[in-house]
Image (cartoon, rainbow, N blue to C red):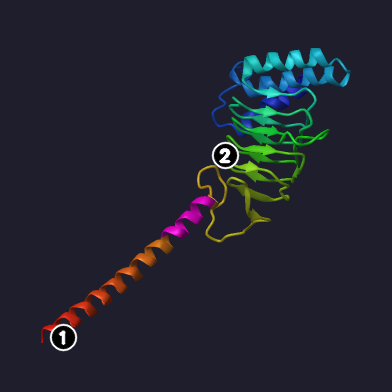
Amino acid sequence: MFKQLKEDIALIKERDPAARNTFEILVTYSGLHAVWYYRLSHFFYKHSMFTIARMISQWARFWTGIEIHPGATIGKGLFIDHGMGVVIGETAEIGDNCLLYQGVTLGGTGKDKGKRHPTLGNNVMVGAGAKVLGPFKVGDNVKIAANAVVLEEIPSNSTAVGVPARIVKLNGVKINPKDNICDQIHIPDPVSQEMCQLHKQIKKLKEELNVCESIISKHNIDCDKDTTD
């Protein structure tokens, strides 16, 4: 238990530049507390003590703002940064060394039975407010941008953005050369890019229309002149 505790604290120090010291991490990091509560509730869940398990998870939700169903399967090295509003469903599976930001939902669509929630591979980063919904797999080393809505499988070593989420980078190669790397700062937005293209087309059409109006106006002036003559 103490070994696991040391590993959890070391992980936070490595990933969070705001982490100043061990004591601060122990008493103030809600994501860390939520993971500890989850481990306890998961123990009871595996031993078919479902009510006790849910009571612990609801208590954790009250104190941390993070809801992790005790039936979820979570690997080592999970870091929930900030954490408020994170929801992890009963049949969700999370691999090793994953990073979840606040407002993330690993949920279901309401249409599936049995396995209802997503499976995340190893080293997956899910940005703030992102929703991953359904019983599909998200591969290893995937980055999901903030506020993305993921509704289908994502291959390993890729970056997904948008609503619904689209893959913009795969195996180190940008799907669209104009897209930027998903670094939580410069995040490509497919919808915004489409709007920009439409704006350019409208601008071009306006310029062509002005040319046509100029020609028509000149033609009318010439016609009036001929009539006067």
Q: Which mark is residue 226?
A: 1
Q: Main secondary structure of the magenta part?
A: helix
Assign the C terminus to one quadrant of the image. bottom left
Say which label, 2 or 1, has the lower sequence index: 2
Residue 200 lies, with reference to residue 167, above or below; the image says below
Name the residue rendered at 42%, 58% in the picture. Answer: 199
Using the numbered discs, state the Cα–Cα distance from disc 2 to disc 1 in whole angstroms: 65 Å
Residue 114 spot, x, y in % from top left: 83, 33
Q: Disc 2 vs disc 1: which is toward the camera?
A: 1
Magenta stretch: give its range: 191-199
Residue 227 lies, with reference to residue 45, above or below; the image says below
Nearest the viewer among 42 and 135 is 135
Few, some or many residues within 10 Å of mark 2 (<14, 14–19, 20+): some
Nearest the viewer among 133 and 184 is 133
According to the image, label 2 marks what residue? 147
In this view of the protein, can residue 122 be seen by the observer?
A: yes
Element marked by disc 1 = helix
Name the residue rendered at 56%, 51% in the picture. Answer: 181
Residue 164 lies, with reference to residue 173, above or below; the image says above
Residue 26's quadrant in the figure? top right
Relative to 47, 192 lies left or right: left
Mark 1 is on which residue type?
Asp
Few, some or many residues within 10 Å of mark 1 (<14, 14–19, 20+): few
Relative to 44, 36 lies left or right: left
Nearest the viewer among 59 and 133 is 133
Outermost residue on the left side: it is: 229
Outermost residue on the front side: it is: 227
Asked if residue 193 lies in the magenta stretch, the reply is yes
Residue 212 spot, x, y in % from top left: 31, 73
Mark 2 is on which residue type?
Asn
